[in-house]
Structures are given as structure tokens and as C-alpha cells.
Amino acid sequence: MDSLFDSAAEEATPQPLAVRMRPRTLDEVIGQRHLLGSGTPLRRLVESEAPMSLFLWGPPGTGKTTLAYVVSNVTERRFIEVSAVSAGVKDVRAAIDNARRELGMTGRQTVLFVDEVHRFNKAQQDALLPAVENRWVTFIGATTENPFFSVISPLLSRSLLLTLESLSDDDVRAVLERAVSDPRGLGGRATLSPEALDHLVRLAGGDARRSLTYLEAAALLADDITVEVVEKAVDKAAVRYDRQGDQHYDVISAFIKSMRGSDADAALHYLARMIEAGEDPRFIARRVVIFASEDVGLADPTCLQTAVAAAQAVQLIGLPEGQINLAHAVIHCAMAPKSNAVVKAIGAAVGDVRKGLIGQVPGHLRDAHYPGAAKLGHGDGYKYPHDFDHGLVRQDYAPEQVRGRRYYEPTRHGAEAPVAERWAKIRDFLRGS
């Protein structure tokens, strides 16, 4: 295994636990089951001799470097790692020339692994193209950012894109348990209490490398690893929070009710508790998005935009930076004027439908574009609103069974006040009042 940045001093340094525990075969890899099954691109790459170019996209600690290393190890290809943080075009070309020489002289293929590939500029990415196109190397690029935004199209189009997912709690627990017992890890020299194991799983947040780093730090302090030892080792108090039990539901309930009550400080407290306890940030983001429509609605139409943007940001960049985006949305939701008119409106409409108040779509509103529709009278008498003053025309829109039913009843809060005035006028006009 080669690296452009190895040195004799580095080789003499004891390897971190996360490096020692790196899987050597695909069967040792924990998690990412959707990428490791029979017939998947990774399996084909390992089982065949043909070079292949891949992009591995996923959050930190999900196994991008591990998978590249496993491909190299199992196929007995040389492994050259380039860090996009410090390498330049000259380094990339040197790595490719080295791989070409090895291929020409011995026939041995090379895995060229570029970590943080999204940090390469266009010229640096362009330098990879000949090697990828001519298959001089098996290129594997790892990125935590959306490659459709950060990687040039010619390079992306010549490669397979594989998306890695955050590890589940069970996956991280399996990683830790293996590290405690495996001779490459702690070799049974330390014991890990169930409570300490749960705390490490929460702290990891789906990041296997982080979990092993914390375990190693705790093992340096004591052979009997308890919650207190972990707290001391990583300087993080154990947040008593069971994601499957009452505390999970109590905290998320208090979080939502604090936003609904416009107490931004309390809402931020519960947000922090969930993040520190290792709650899935995507779950938190989904709750905020729901809240934006359920409890704010049209009283502040921009609230939903902020919530959705925060959810997308969390998906894109993950934690820890994503907590800033979540806090942004939580403060916006808490401080916004409140209205539950939207959720009441759809609830009332769904209620009527479930009661059987459905009826036939009025004939003049039916689709009149397909052949034969005119013979059925579909569309007859329809009045096109844009042909009338103010874009409004009086005609029946609802089925007869629910004509006159009132679903949306806007409040006078925030931006919904002018909506309420306009809707009252429109409704009166349409109903003939």
C-alpha cells in the first residue's frame, strides 16, 4: 500500500484504533448492505480484473476509505492515496505516471484513491480524466458533498456513483464490540459496560471512525470502561436519552411545544439535547418541516422555506455543521406568528371525504383534451378566469355534496391577516354573497 505522503516517521508511529480495525474483506465491512450484495458494482469490481471508476458519496465515518482499501486489498492491487486537501496537479500526475509504469512493467493494477475529491479544482479534476478514460487506474473518489455540484461532468459521467448511508446504531455497536475483542483492536484487554457502549453509540452519530476514536481515548484511561470514563475521555456528559423509549417522545414533544409556544430558548435547549444524545438530525429536520406548516402555515409563508432549506442542508453536510442550520430553522419557527389554519383545513376536507362526501366533478371542470370528451359534454360552459376582471369568475368548482363547505379559515396572525381579508372577499364573490 502506497501513499504520496508516507514517511518513515509516520510508519513508526502506532496506528490509531480506527486504522487497525479497518476491514480487510467486504464480508468484514459493517453497514452499507445495499452496496455489498451479490451483483452490486463493488462486488463486481472485487470479483473481476477490469478497472472501474467509482465515486463514494456519504457522511464522514461511513466507510469510504475502508471500501477503497478493501477493494485494493482483496484484488491485490496497489493502493495509492491522494488527499485533495494538500495535493496539486503535479502530485496527481505523478501518481498516475507511477501507476502506468507499474501496469506496463508488471501488469499489476493500481487503486488511486482521492479523499475529499470535491476539494479539487477543475484543473486538478481534469488531470484525472486520462487515467479514468484509459483505465490506467481503478479510480475511487470519496466525497462528503454532492458530487453533482462539486465534480466536473466529464469525470462524473465516466464513473459510477455509490451513495453511502450513516451507520445505524446496531452497526456502530457491532463495530465497537468487534474492536474490544479483536486482537487488532483492544484484544479483550479492556471491558466495556453496556451503559458505556450505549453512550459511545450515541456520541458516534452514525460515524464508525468517531466511535473507535472515542473508545481508544477511553481505553487509555482505564481497562474497565464505564460511562464516567467515557465522559472524562471525550469531555462529553452522557445525555440520558433513550431513542426508543419515553425520553425520546418526551423530548421531541417538549421541543415542538416550545416552538409552538414561541419560546426559542427552550426549543434550542431541546434541540441541543437531541443532537448531543445522537438523535438522527434528519428526524429532527422532518419534525421542523412538519411544524412549519402545521403550526405556522401562512402566518409566515417563509417559515416552511427555511425549514425545508435546513432539512436539505442537513442531508447535504450532516453534523456537526448541520446543527447551525437546524438552529436557524428552529429559531425562525419559534419566533414566527402562529396559525394552525392549514392543518385544520386539510383535516376538515379529509374528514368529509372519509364520510363519503365526494360527488361527481362538475362537467364544466372535467378534462376535455382527449378524443371523445366533447361528445360527453366535458368542459362545456367552463369560464376561463384569466378572461375576466381580477382573474375571478363565478362558477361552481366543488362537487354538489360539499358545495358551500368551509375548510380554510385563516387567522388574523402575521402574514395570514391580509390572506384572510382576500380569502373572505373571494369566497363571498364565488358563493354569490
Image (spheres, rainbow, N blue to C red):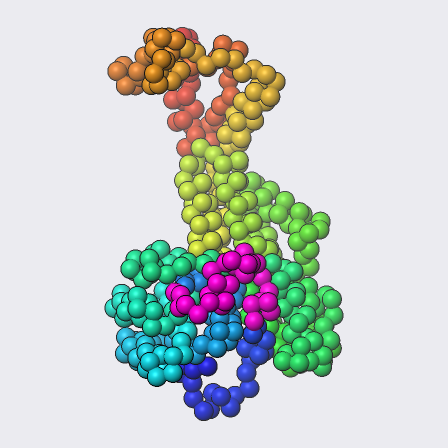
Question: Nearest the camera: 60 or 411?
Answer: 60
Position in image of residue 14 (x %, y %): 55, 86
**Which residue: 41% across, 10% down?**
363
Quarter of the image that includes the C terminus: top left
**Which residue: 54% across, 22% down?**
349
Whether residue 144 appears in magenta in the rendering, the answer is: no
Q: How many marks?
A: 0
Question: Nearest the camera: 283 or 239?
Answer: 283
Whether residue 30 appears in magenta in the rendering, the answer is: yes
**Which residue: 52% across, 73% down?**
74
Residue 114 in view: no
Position in image of residue 117 (x %, y %): 37, 67
Residue 273 in view: yes
Task: Please say if 349 is above or below 361.
Answer: below
**Which residue: 68% across, 70% down?**
177
Task: Please say if 293 is above or below 146.
Answer: above
Task: Please say if 352 is above or below 144.
Answer: above
Task: Please say if 99 is above or below 379.
Answer: below
User: What's the magenta region?
Assistant: 25-53
Position in image of residue 262 (x %, y %): 53, 42
Position in image of residue 299 (x %, y %): 45, 33
43 to the left or right of 212: left
